[in-house]
Amino acid sequence: MRLDRIRNFSIIAHIDHGKSTLADRLLEATGTVALRDMQDQVLDQLDLERERGITIKAQAVRLAYTASDGITYELNLIDTPGHVDFAYEVSRSLAACEGALLVVDATQGVEAQTLANVYQAIDNHLEVIPVINKIDLANADAELVRREIEEVIGIPADDAILTSARQGIGIDLVLEAIVKRVPPPKGDPGGSLRALIFDAKYDAYRGVVVYVRIVDGRIAAGMRIRMMNNKSEFVVDEVGVFAPAMSPVDELLCGEVGYFIASIKNVRDSKVGDTVTDAAHPTTHPLPGYRAVTPMVYAGIFPVDSDDVTDLKEALQRLNLNDASLIFEPESSAALGFGFRCGFLGLLHMEIVQERLEREFNLSLITTAPTVEYRVRLRSGEVIAIDNPEMLPDASHIDAIEEPRTKATIIVPSTYVGAIMELCQERRGEFQHMDYQPGDRVALTYDLPLGEIIHDFYDQLKSRSRGYASLDYEITGFRAESLVKLDILVGGQRVDALSMIVHRDRANAHGRKLAERLRKLIPRQLFEVPIQAAIGGKIVARETVSAMRKDVLAKCYGGDITRKRKLLEKQREGKRRMKRVGNVEIPQEAFMAVLKMDEQ
Amino acid sequence: MTTARGDVGSLYLHIPFCERKCEYCDFTSVAGATGSDAYMEALCTEVRRLGERLGRLSLDTVFIGGGTPSLVDPELLAGLVATVRNTFSVAVDAEVTMEANPSSVSTGRARAWKAAGVNRISLGVQSLEADALSFLGRVHDADRALAAVGEVRAAGFTSINCDLIYAVPGLGDTRWRRTLERVVAAGPTHISCYELTVEPGTPLHTQVRRGLVKPVEGVRSMRQHRIAVEVLERAGYAQYEVSNFALPGEECRHNLVYWHNGYYAAAGVGAHGHLPAEAAAAIGLDVEAGAVSMRYWHGRGIAAYGRAVGAGLLPVAGSEPVGPGMREQERVMLGLRLREGVRIGASSLVEARALEGLGLLAVDGDRVRATARGEAVLNQVTLRLIGDQAA
């Protein structure tokens, strides 16, 4: 395909603003997917993605579109993940494109997450085409949204396209705009191969399928290629495009988007952002922008039944084949036994991994409260990284504990500004600035500790703004703070998995709340169970779960023993979801109690 | 006769008719005795068929439960007992229990039952307080209940049980104690005290769901249980099972078969049986490989029961194989209800010691029994002892 007949674009949108529906309409309108094969939201392939209405993995699909000029163009749609956890993947997907559709809900306006992604697109020099969607809804205000796009994002929106993806309105205009406004890719068709990896997925039968954008040169089966970051080399077995199913082609040329398969066993060998080159004629200049993705959030994952630890390991390895950003190493907890300390890109990533482990591998798990990575400066001058409160050295050895800080942007209707500022203050946020935006909305910028953001901040943000606030954040660095370790004792025994690092000023209040919350979560046992919170050996709070008084079936139902046994089995099912620590049975959700402390 | 069938020494027979359905009852029963002639005939047919398939079992206990067996014509009952005696070998000293409600007891009827070969009567007294009886939907009053005990005794019965219910909303501890004392004074040889439980599908359940009735809370219910233990033990009735009390030698042998995880054949609508694998196969149940025994149950419809029996079919609605693991769990679950306790395997001993440390179990060698405190949380104790693995 000639370069000037190719258009590579992605769609940027907030959750629920209609990205998937628009993508479906584009597929339909170009005949990529026959109407009868249309399943809602073709591009979201994981069940989880469909259920949550978000995209976790990037997807790419090739559309053939005959424009009004009579020429048939090759359009490559690269669907980007829609969550802050996957910001780096988004940036690489955008780097593979020359243009982006900015889809904004005509009833909702621009959200913080969208803002962050649009800025990335602008930084990557993409042509941004504003699309105002859901114009068929009664409360749509396209004019207000148009102004908002101009004033908030700072891009012209005079020629924004008005659509209703649901009703199929404006779809042709979008396709025409892609051809007319998105620039064709540039590149050197005769140069040595440079391809940008923007995603990879593991296929049990074929190995890793690598999603690439060819920047220079070409790639074809039989070529020996090299991953420039880790120097590993492979021979290409197959190249192809997504239409939307995988269809092999002879070669992928400069400017094109597609996949290749090269007997790669592990997605770690095909890292997002890496440059693929020809091993025989390697380029000397890798594409810019590669960086190793590092976890932001850490948590312990343990099987409820200790016998399942091998199954858990295998399951993590399987997920890891497809998700290089998930890291894990063995961890042993006095309370929970053997498990794994896992690192995630963010809370959503953590939830997804946990859900997939439980759902796809049928494991019953306990996930401990998430924590961030702290930098601890020891009196010896050594600096160590701590991603597990349990590993914090004794206070006498510590000179200072530094926590990761973020620049957080929150966009919220002005009515809720007070409530949100209060939340940020409670979470030790430092106010930076406040911008008024059209549509009576405010953009707040705070310096917030990452450790606070991962503890129920998002849910609080939503509940205190009736769901209207949106959030984006980026790490800015580390800063020394007065931090201490809060321990929890259940039945007089310290439960390591419940320890957390908190700010000294708030430690007592935290301890009280956590103990109170645990009292509600831990069911009555056969004996009284004290729950205590302690800082450095000093008890700061105590609650008691009183002993169970009665649990007996008085009747024996004639000879119907089956029924009695089944009632007992039902109870046992409930118990099986609990972890026995010492003599006390603690339900799974108790280990996450710290996440929901602001709930009443 | 094979050994496996020789283990079956008990028979349960179900008669579903009642004067009216009680508010709390979810046993198989219908109001009125219409159709009891045909039903009793079908029941006899099923008994005979069991005999054909199982051979002439030696029966040590027979239990005719309901429903209200006392409601049907005594001649029909006599016919049923005669059928059992003709079909099986009923031991000379066998325990033959029949359930009766005070409202359908008279000296004359009781004499007929005695003559038919019934030697133990279980009376559904439930309460002696008028408001509690009316709440429960019982048709008799306290005088009738106490009179019934006398009539049964006058007819020559020496083994008499009274069923009582506690934790009835509105019935305080004092009046519960009074009920117990008055029943004791009437002189039955056995007393069962069951907690009122709200079973799905009963009118009581509907009332609770609508908020019209508030169930008695657990702590108060447990207190009434302890009152029963205290009053009855003082009167010489030993608590030999969580809910059952008897004068020496008057324990219900049929129910002990249940609690000892024994075998029993069953006939009649809704009846549950438990047979060793070979006997289960002999009556026509599909026995899974590896099953030690089978638990099985009859359907609840009277008409369907009659049709099935008439067509020569086994009127069984469902069954469940019991493998060695489940058998062991059931043995412990049931045995823990007994004051004599139950033997446990060596692997449970550590857990048993821990429970002993909590004051919930008494451990004596390889035998454990629940303490008074353990009894209150017996489900938990059981779960701890049988481990949290599925059978």
Image (cartoon, coloured by chain):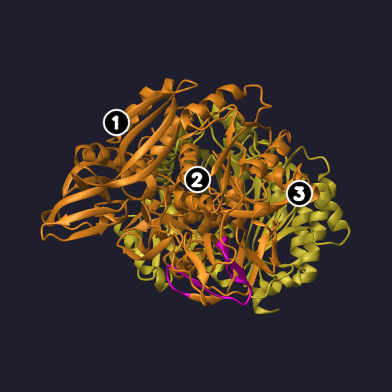
Chain colours: A orange, B yellow
Which class describes the residues within 10 Å of circle 3: few (<14), some (14-19), or many (20+)?
few
Q: Is residue B360 left or right of residue B52?
A: left
Residue B177, relative to residue B13: is it above or below?
above
Q: Amino acid at mark 3?
A: Ile
Q: Amino acid at mark 1?
A: Phe
Q: CA distance from mark 3 to mark 1?
A: 54 Å
Tag 1, which chain?
A: A
Give yes or no for residue A206 being in the magenta stretch.
yes
Q: Position of residue A120 (x, y in %)?
A: 46, 44
* Mark 1 or 2: the one toward you: 2
Residue at the spot 81% in from the left edge and 65% down from the top edge: B49
- The secondary element bearing badge 2 is classed as loop
The residue pinned by badge 3 equals A71
Q: Which mark is residue B240?
A: none
B210 or A339: nearer the viewer: A339
Q: Position of residue A166 (x, y in %)?
A: 70, 35
Q: Position of residue A383 (x, y in %)?
A: 19, 59
What residue is shown with label 2? A125
Which span of residues is magenta-colored?
A203-232
Q: Position of residue B313 (x, y in %)?
A: 84, 61
Given the current orientation, which residue lies at the most extreme bottom position?
B2
Check residue A431 in the rendering and tell me which mark sits there, or answer none.
1
Label 3 lies in what chain?
A
In depth, the one of A106 and A382 nearer the eye is A106
The amino acid type found where label 2 is placed reads His
Q: Is residue B310 visible?
A: yes
